[in-house]
């Protein structure tokens, strides 16, 4: 199991790495998954837009892009998180920064576990799973 955290072109966020790593592992296990190699890369809106355009042909900002490299029940991938968009979400949804960052971080893990959010029904189920995961923290 390896969960790594890096910062690219933004200051590193205040997270408790060990506690966060244990939490991510518990969430994965609650969905019958094992951790392979997960890398979090915290970045700016400019970087997330560049990645979104280059790899997904999307011309918009997003809070997270998940590059899934999972095999069977072992989840692995690179999760790019725009801290700029996380801050925008905090203002938009009137929430706490740490809670919103945790929500976005676990959102990527849930994608690695195989959960989608493209339809309204899938999006609702994803929100429910995020809430369940946040309660495990």
Image (cartoon, rainbow, N blue to C red):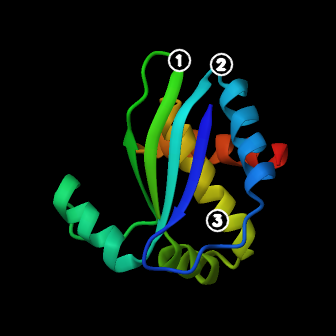
- Between discs 2 and 1, the one toward the N terminus: 2
**Residue at horizontal 60 percent and vertical 37 percent from the top:** 2
Q: Is residue 44 visible?
A: yes
Is residue 116 visible from the viewing direction of this image?
no
Q: Which mark is residue 73?
A: 1
Badge 3 vs badge 2, beta-carbon distance below 8 Å: no
Residue name at image x 69 percent, y 41 percent = 24
Depth check, front residue: 96 or 7: 7
Which residue has dot 2 on it? 32
Q: Secondary structure at mark 1?
A: loop
Q: CA distance from mark 3 to mark 2?
A: 24 Å
**Residue 82 location in percent, x, y?**
46, 70
* Mark earlier in primary sequence (3, 1): 1
Q: Residues within 10 Å of mark 2 (few under 14, many from 20)?
A: few
89 relative to 36, above or below: below
> In the image as oriented, which residue stretches furthest toward the top?
72
- Tell me whether circle 2 and circle 1 mark residues in contact (CB < 8 Å): yes
Q: Quadrant of residue 43?
A: bottom left
The tag earlier along the polypeptide, 3 or 2, is: 2
Residue 108: horizontal and vertical position, in percent? 52, 47
The structure residue drawn at horizontal position 66% and vertical position 31%, both measured from the top left corner, is 28
Q: Secondary structure at mark 2?
A: loop
Tag 3 near tag 1, CB within 8 Å? no
Q: Residues within 10 Å of mark 3 (few under 14, many from 20)?
A: many
Determine whether the residue tagged by mark 3 lies in a helix, strand or loop.
helix
Query: Badge 3 is on which residue?
Result: 101
């Amino acid at each position: 199991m390896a969960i790594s955290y890096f910062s690219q072109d933004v200051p590193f966020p205040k997270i408790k790495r060990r506690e966060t790593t244990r939490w991510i592992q518990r969430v994965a296990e609650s969905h019958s998954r094992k951790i392979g190699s997960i890398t979090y890369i915290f970045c700016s809106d400019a970087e997330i837009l560049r990645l979104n355009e280059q790899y997904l042909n999307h011309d918009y900002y997003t809070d997270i892009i998940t590059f899934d490299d999972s095999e069977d029940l072992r989840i692995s991938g690179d999760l790019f998180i725009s801290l700029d968009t996380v801050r925008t979400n905090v203002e938009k949804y009137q929430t706490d920064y740490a809670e919103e960052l945790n929500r976005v971080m676990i959102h990527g893990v849930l994608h690695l576990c195989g959960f989608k959010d493209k339809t309204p029904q899938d999006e609702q189920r994803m929100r429910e799973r995020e809430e369940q995961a946040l309660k495990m923290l």
